[in-house]
Image (tube, rainbow, N blue to C red):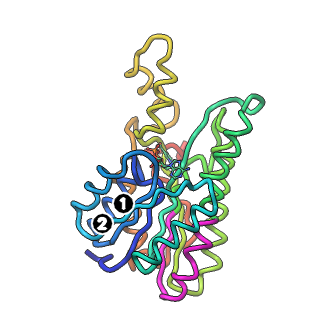
Amino acid sequence: MELKGKTALVTGSTSGIGLGIATRLAQAGCDLILNGFGDSEAPKAQVGEAGGRVGYHAADLSQPEQIADLFAYAEREFGGVDILVNNAGIQHVAPVESFPIEKWDAIIAINLSSVFHATRLALPGMRERGWGRIVNIASVHGLVGSAQKSAYVAAKHGVVGLTKVVALETADCNITCNALCPGWVLTPLVQQQIDARAVGDGDLERARRELLEEKQPSLEFVTPAQLGELTTFLCTEAAAQVRGAAWNIDGGWLAR
Ligand code: NAD
């Protein structure tokens, strides 16, 4: 319970990685503010079981004024945000010359600009309280490219760059900012890509195996629970001098 008394906001925490991280932070003693689309009751119950208070705000992170509403809610109901996990993200796969413009704009807004907005809104309260942790869920695609993922790779490289700048601007105080760079994690975002590979023969098992074989030497998915563990570590005093890192957790993807 070493994070008892801290309030954590995890964006995009109704599903996948965000839900795993929120659950682990609740187990560490945090109060949690959840966010994201779809059903919020089951995620609230799951995180609530771990202990602590659980709130929820439905802000669409592509809209800066809704992000401001989310922070006003956090201030009003929880007294501010001590731990910010910028996790919400979407994907679209297409060659650059036929990449839909509205998909480009949405990916840049949700995967990159929302990290800027949430960070600029979180920092004043963290500075006032003299403590803060920002963990940005980037991707291996923040460090290397893959074909057909122009917007995603551009946004995630942007997140890694923004992480370094925020780490420098907070280097003189007890606020840290780091990025995690996961490889494949089996969430709805990746299941869509497996489904797309199986169109034709319908062989989901083959599609899943080939997806891993192409990039991830361990041939195993990273799990939301493992990402929750690493995020929690970055929030402890042991990690107080981990600053501006882009920490890959990728089954060996970047080692090749
Ligand atoms: P997911 O689809 O399971 O969850 C995405 C979450 O973001 C959901 O809660 C969804 O409601 C929310 N969201 C989407 N658009 C939103 C918006 N406009 N406003 C508010 N919330 C919104 O996906 P995931 O795989 O858990 O991805 C989470 C993060 O991890 C993303 O940033 C993704 O890029 C990153 N990531 C995922 C993988 C992977 O293999 N799954 C690998 C590396 C990085």
User: Which quadrant holds the C terminus?
Assistant: top right
Judge: label 2 CB < 8 Å from ligand 1: no
| On screen, residue 154 above or below 2 | above
Residue at image coords 53%, 61%:
136
Left or right of 108 in this view: 187:
left
Judge: label 1 CB < 8 Å from ligand 1: no
Q: Nearer the viewer, residue 214 or 136?
A: 136
Image coordinates of residue 211 in percent, x first then y, are 48, 29
Give the dominant element type of the magenta stretch: helix, strand or loop: helix
Disc 2 to disc 1: CB gap under 8 Å: yes
Left or right of 102 in this view: 242:
left
Q: Which residue is mark 2?
A: 26
Image coordinates of residue 19 in percent, x first then y, are 37, 53
Q: Which residues are magenta?
A: 117-135
| On screen, residue 86 above or below 238 | above
User: Which quadrant holds the N terminus?
Assistant: bottom left
Tell which residue pokes out farthest to the top in this image: 201
Please tell me whether residue 125 belongs to the stretch shown in magenta.
yes
Corner quadrant of residue 148: top right
Q: Which residue is mark 1?
A: 22
Corner quadrant of residue 221: top left
Q: Amino acid at mark 1?
A: Ala
| On screen, residue 123 above or below 163 | below
Q: Which element carries disc 1, helix, strand or loop?
A: helix
Residue at image coords 65%, 79%:
169
Q: Amino acid at mark 2?
A: Ala
Residue at image coords 32%, 65%:
54
Please tell me whether residue 214 belongs to the stretch shown in magenta.
no
Which of the numbered marks, if any, corresponds to residue 74?
Answer: none
Measured Cα–Cα span from mark 2 to mark 1: 6 Å
Q: How would you rate the neighbour count of disc 1 (Cα within 10 Å): few for under 14, some for 14-19, many for 20 or more?
A: many
